[in-house]
């Protein structure tokens, strides 16, 4: 018998009731969310149809839908999504990994931290778009410089957040580890990293947005493919349907990546 | 009582340095702890009690003087000692069982025999059914007991207890402290307890060391003896000699 079933058998009437109310309220919230979105879409569609707003400027759900399906038929859509997705995921993974690695180095050596910290703060405050032209000249107008943009946007803030969490680990827990004779590496793996779990997950969630910002900025600057390019193209040729379609696709990409991170988080929590 | 000295402080001075100032925490501290003894250190706040324990554990070296552990000078981490602190510091991401294995893991001694010993301790002291639980599912008192078992699993000779009961409510404190005292006696350990609580010191210890205010020296060492053997800590608290000891310690403590 699984543990879950075993627990279920032991629930009292009151607890059953509590669970029923809990489930009901979460169902209610989901329903309200869905109907709000539905209401918004219908309202948008109708106001465009009855010319309450200018369809050319605000587009409409059906026009966005047709734009997307047209793009899908030509096959261009999947190519663009593929490019953007690839750039985002590579940038996201590199940014996060480098963030963690640098954070570990900075935590490990107080000396390095003192030297690097001011540079980090300046780099963090600097809008990374400003570095765009330099990156393009150095690396070339290609996918690689877009990935570097995504990486740059996410890595600095990752380092800052993770180092902060590392530093905030309870001093006395470290003392406890040391009293058992723990090495610095053991303190890192058995205490600092697991204690920073929620911050690491939070960094992942933030970095989805960060690397998307980097990728879209990069595509605005150099690309001939990708959703960012689609949006720029739409904007320059006044095809606002295309711009809107790009935005819709971006939100789908962002929320799918978010869901993946949430899945990962749940799997990791279960494993510990 | 066995009269073998397990810890000896010879003229220990301890100074802390910061950019702004130099703090002399301990000045010429001399005292000894005997094997399997339960000794309590009391003293005004900030006088250097925790510092004394850190010195014994070898986490920090003294500014001058020597510490002898079983007759030889201590350098580096003291392999014979293990810490128990005010908070239990159980790791929430580990089960109770994994928590008590922590010391063994760090020392790379997590083999079958030692695992078995650790789990036996858990069973012996009534926590076996919680072995797969998480720390947050246990009460404060139970968590402190787990923390004690975590220190015991590495089989230390000397237990360093830094106010381990001060975060507990009064009733739990009395129960857990006497239970933990019993465990320590049963496992034949030497215990050095730091406490703010004079009653706790009298009811648990064989001797009480009173430190003066900073820079601290030993002000008084008091042997606690009741005529009857094996009194529980509650019985000791009600004993007529209790107030006698209490007054001596109280009057010996520097008031700030
Ligand atoms: N790492 C440190 N750096 C500088 N000063 C320190 C350090 N640790 C302790 N001190 C100083 O040394 C003195 C003794 O500290 P310690 O923590 O040993 O006192 P304590 O008796 O345990 O105090 P409490 O009763 O508050 O726990 C205090 O004045 C404290 O400010
Ligand atoms: Mg202290």
Image (cartoon, coloured by chain):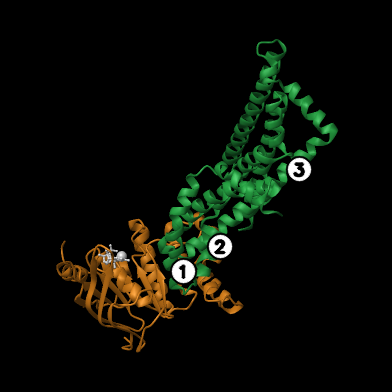
Q: Does dot 1 land on a helix, a strand or a loop? A: helix
For residue B124, say whether it is visible: yes
In this rendered view, identify the residue nearer to me: B35 or A120.
Answer: A120
- Vertical position of residue B190 compared to residue B243: above or below: below
Q: Is mark 1 within 8 Å of ligand 1?
A: no
- Vertical position of residue A75 compared to residue B15: above or below: above
In this rendered view, identify the residue nearer to me: B60 or B236.
Answer: B60
Q: Residue at x 14, y 68 (%)?
A: B251
Residue B93: image location, x then y, percent: 55, 58
Respond whether the residues carrying marks 1 and 2 are from the same subunit: no
Residue B129 numbered tag: 2
**In this rendering, would B235 be left or right of A237?**
left
Residue B21: image location, x then y, percent: 23, 65
Q: Is mark 3 within 8 Å of ligand 1?
A: no
CA gap between label 3 and label 1 equals: 47 Å
**In this rendering, would A239 be left or right of B38?**
right
Q: Nearer the viewer, mark 3 or mark 2?
A: 3
Quadrant of the rendering where the C terminus of chain B is positioned = bottom left
Residue bearing mark 1: A177
Residue A162: image location, x then y, percent: 51, 54
Q: Quadrant of residue B175?
A: bottom left
**In this rendering, would B49 be left or right of A87?**
left
Residue B5: image location, x then y, percent: 32, 87
Q: State the orange chain.
A: B
Q: Chain of mark 2?
A: B
Q: Quadrant of residue A24?
A: top right
Residue bearing mark 3: A82
Q: State the green chain.
A: A
Q: Nearer the viewer, mark 1 or mark 2?
A: 1
Q: Residue at x 25, y 64 (%)?
A: B46
The reply to whether discs 1 and 2 touch (Cβ–Cβ < 8 Å) is: no
């Amino acid at each position: 018998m699984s543990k879950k079933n075993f627990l279920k058998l032991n629930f009292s009437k009151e607890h059953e009731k509590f669970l029923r109310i809990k489930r009901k309220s979460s169902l209610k919230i989901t329903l309200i969310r869905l109907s709000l979105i539905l209401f918004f879409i219908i309202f948008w569609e109708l106001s465009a149809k009855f010319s309450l707003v200018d369809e050319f400027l605000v587009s409409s759900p059906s026009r966005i839908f047709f734009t997307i399906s047209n793009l899908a038929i030509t096959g261009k859509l999947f190519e663009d999504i593929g490019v953007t997705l690839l750039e985002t995921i590579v940038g996201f993974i590199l940014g996060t990994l480098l963030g963690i690695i640098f954070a570990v180095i900075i935590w490990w050596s107080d000396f390095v931290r003192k030297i690097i910290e001011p540079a980090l703060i300046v780099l963090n405050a600097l809008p990374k778009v400003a570095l765009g032209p330099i990156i393009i000249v150095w690396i070339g107008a290609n996918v690689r410089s877009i990935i570097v943009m995504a990486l740059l946007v996410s890595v600095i803030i990752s380092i800052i957040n993770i180092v902060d969490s590392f530093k905030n680990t309870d001093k006395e827990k470290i003392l406890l580890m040391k009293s058992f004779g723990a090495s610095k590496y053991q303190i890192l793996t058995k205490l600092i990293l697991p204690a920073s779990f929620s911050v690491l997950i939070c960094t992942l969630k933030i970095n989805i947005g960060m690397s998307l910002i980097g990728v879209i900025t990069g595509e605005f600057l150099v690309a001939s493919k990708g959703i960012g390019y689609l949006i720029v193209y739409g904007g320059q040729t006044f095809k606002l349907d295309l711009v809107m379609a790009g935005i819709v696709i971006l939100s789908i990409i962002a929320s799918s990546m978010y869901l993946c991170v949430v899945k990962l988080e749940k799997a990791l929590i279960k494993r510990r | 009582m066995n009269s073998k000295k397990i810890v000896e402080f010879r003229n220990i001075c301890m100074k802390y340095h910061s950019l702004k100032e130099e703090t002399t925490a301990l000045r010429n501290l001399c005292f000894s702890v005997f094997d399997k003894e339960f000794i309590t250190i009391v003293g005004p706040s900030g006088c250097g009690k925790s510092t004394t324990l850190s010195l014994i554990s070898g986490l920090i070296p003294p500014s001058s003087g020597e510490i002898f552990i079983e007759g030889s000078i201590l350098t580096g981490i003291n392999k014979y000692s293990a810490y128990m602190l005010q908070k239990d510091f159980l790791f929430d991401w580990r089960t109770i069982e994994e928590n008590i294995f922590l010391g063994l893991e760090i020392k790379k001694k997590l083999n079958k025999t030692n695992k078995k010993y650790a789990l036996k301790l858990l069973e012996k002291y009534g926590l076996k059914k919680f072995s797969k639980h998480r720390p947050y599912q246990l009460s404060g008192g139970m968590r402190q007991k787990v923390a004690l078992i975590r220190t015991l699993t590495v089989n230390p000779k000397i237990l360093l207890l830094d106010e381990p009961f001060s975060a507990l409510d009064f009733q739990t404190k009395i129960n857990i402290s006497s239970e933990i005292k019993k465990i320590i006696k049963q496992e034949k350990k030497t215990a050095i307890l730091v406490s703010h609580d004079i009653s706790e010191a009298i009811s648990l210890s064989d001797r009480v060391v009173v430190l003066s205010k900073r820079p601290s020296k030993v002000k008084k060492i008091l042997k606690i003896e009741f005529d009857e053997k094996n009194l529980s800590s509650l019985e000791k608290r009600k004993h007529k000699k209790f107030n006698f000891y209490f007054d001596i310690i109280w009057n010996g403590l520097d008031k700030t």
